[in-house]
Image: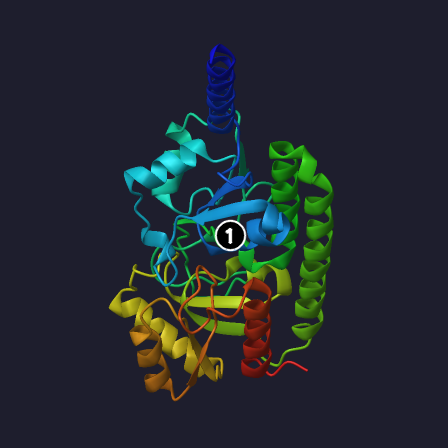
């Protein structure tokens, strides 16, 4: 009887120790590395590089407007407790505050903007990246945060996510490195296809619903004319909208681009006033019901097809 009690006591002690280790160490209940991502492009990188070894929680729900994210107390706690956090600074204010206030206790944090040259954008009115046109006096009101729309920037970010996952779980290093190598090759091919596909276009200007494509425009020698500012909720003045309408007519622009997760009303107004067609150019801030079976690479390829068609690229 004494022996049985001793054995039972030892078992309880072992169980308690194992529980404490599990609670104190990284990873979720099945041993996977816990990753919190702020929105879809960060989620894409974490899932592709981490594979089955990671458990990914995304703060922005599918179909939600990423710019307007507000965090619950539970989400803030997840940011504090995650082994790795992947986010984009100066894009979602609530996430920036959560990162600044977090006691991460050694957890890795990856910023998709790290190492990316900033590009100025407008908060209101429209912007034109890469060109100065006479008669336009543009007051750039902020830095364009949409860094992921240049695939070369995603290559840099992928390397950062790989290194953070290796730091969090060295035992998974070979998996993370192999997955990252495969993804980086895909992204580099995507970049090369954008470069060749947009090298010879009859039209280098394109009109978008909001100023999300500054990084893409700068990378491939195009000019973005944005109806709304960096935040899709910032509407242009009547004068700015009239200027855009005249610019579409004057430059023979045949397509006005809308997007899936924001209102297309202003873009459709410009198209109607100018006789232009509408088509989708996706800023890929999140997936929708319509794009739930797609991913970053496939949606970027759809964007390339849309641009080459609208701009008469050979």
Outermost residue, left direction?
Answer: 238
Query: How far across and down, in percent of the image, does residue 202 sit?
Result: 61, 81
**Along the viewing direction, whichever of 89 and 82 lies nearer the viewer:** 82
Specify the color scheme. Answer: rainbow
Q: Which residue is mark 1?
A: 43
Tell me what residue is drawn at x 64 percent, y 80 percent.
313
Residue 118 against residue 129 in the figure, above or below? above
Query: How far across and down, in percent of the image, does residue 248 sit?
Result: 43, 79
User: Is residue 130 among the parts visible in the rendering?
Assistant: no
User: Is residue 236 among the parts visible in the rendering?
Assistant: yes
Tell me what residue is drawn at x 41 percent, y 57 percent.
138
Query: How far across and down, in percent of the image, does residue 224 sit?
Result: 49, 66
Counting labels gives 1
**Along the viewing direction, whichever of 106 and 133 lies nearer the viewer:** 106
Q: Secondary structure at mark 1?
A: helix
Outermost residue, bottom direction?
Answer: 275
Outermost residue, top direction?
Answer: 2
Residue 61 against residue 113 in the figure, above or below? below
Q: Quadrant of residue 163?
A: top right
Q: Is residue 270 left or right of residue 29?
A: left
Q: Is residue 47 left or right of residue 286?
A: right
Tell me what residue is drawn at x 47 percent, y 19 percent.
8
Residue 254 against residue 157 in the figure, above or below? below
Q: Quadrant of the C terminus?
A: bottom right
Q: Quadrant of residue 262?
A: bottom left
Q: Label 1: how many residues lie within 10 Å, few (<14), some (14-19) or many (20+)?
A: many
Q: Is residue 257 left or right of residue 111?
A: left
Q: Is residue 313 left or right of residue 228?
A: right
Query: How far across and down, in percent of the image, does residue 88 sit?
Result: 48, 45
């Amino acid at each position: 009887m004494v022996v049985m009690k001793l054995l039972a006591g030892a078992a309880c002690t072992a169980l308690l120790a194992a529980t404490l280790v599990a609670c104190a160490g990284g990873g979720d209940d099945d041993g996977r590395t816990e990753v919190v991502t702020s929105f879809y492009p960060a989620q894409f990188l974490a899932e592709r590089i981490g594979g089955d070894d990671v458990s990914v929680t995304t703060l922005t729900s599918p179909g939600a407007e990423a710019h307007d994210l507000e965090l619950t107390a539970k989400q803030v706690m997840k940011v504090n407790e995650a082994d790795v956090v992947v986010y984009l600074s100066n894009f979602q204010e609530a996430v920036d505050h959560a990162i600044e206030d977090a006691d991460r206790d050694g957890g890795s944090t990856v910023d998709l903007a790290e190492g990316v040259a900033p590009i100025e954008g407008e908060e209101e009115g429209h912007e034109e990246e890469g060109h100065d046109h006479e008669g336009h006096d543009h007051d750039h009101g902020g830095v364009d945060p949409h860094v992921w729309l240049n695939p070369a920037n995603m290559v840099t970010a992928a390397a950062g996510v790989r290194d953070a996952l290796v730091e969090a779980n060295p035992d998974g290093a070979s998996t993370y490195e192999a997955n990252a190598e495969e993804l980086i090759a895909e992204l580099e091919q995507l970049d090369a296809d954008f470069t060749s596909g947009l090298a010879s276009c009859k039209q280098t200007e394109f009109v978008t619903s909001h100023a999300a494509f500054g990084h893409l425009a700068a990378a491939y020698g195009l000019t973005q004319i944005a109806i709304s500012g960096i935040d899709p909720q910032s509407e242009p003045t009547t004068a700015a909208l009239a200027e855009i309408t005249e610019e579409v007519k004057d430059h023979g622009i045949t397509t006005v681009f809308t997007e899936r997760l924001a209102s297309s009303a202003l873009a459709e107004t410009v198209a109607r006033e100018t006789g232009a067609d509408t088509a989708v150019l996706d800023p890929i801030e999140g997936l929708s019901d319509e794009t739930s079976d797609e991913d970053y690479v496939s949606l970027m390829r759809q964007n390339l097809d849309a641009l080459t068609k609208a701009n008469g690229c050979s």
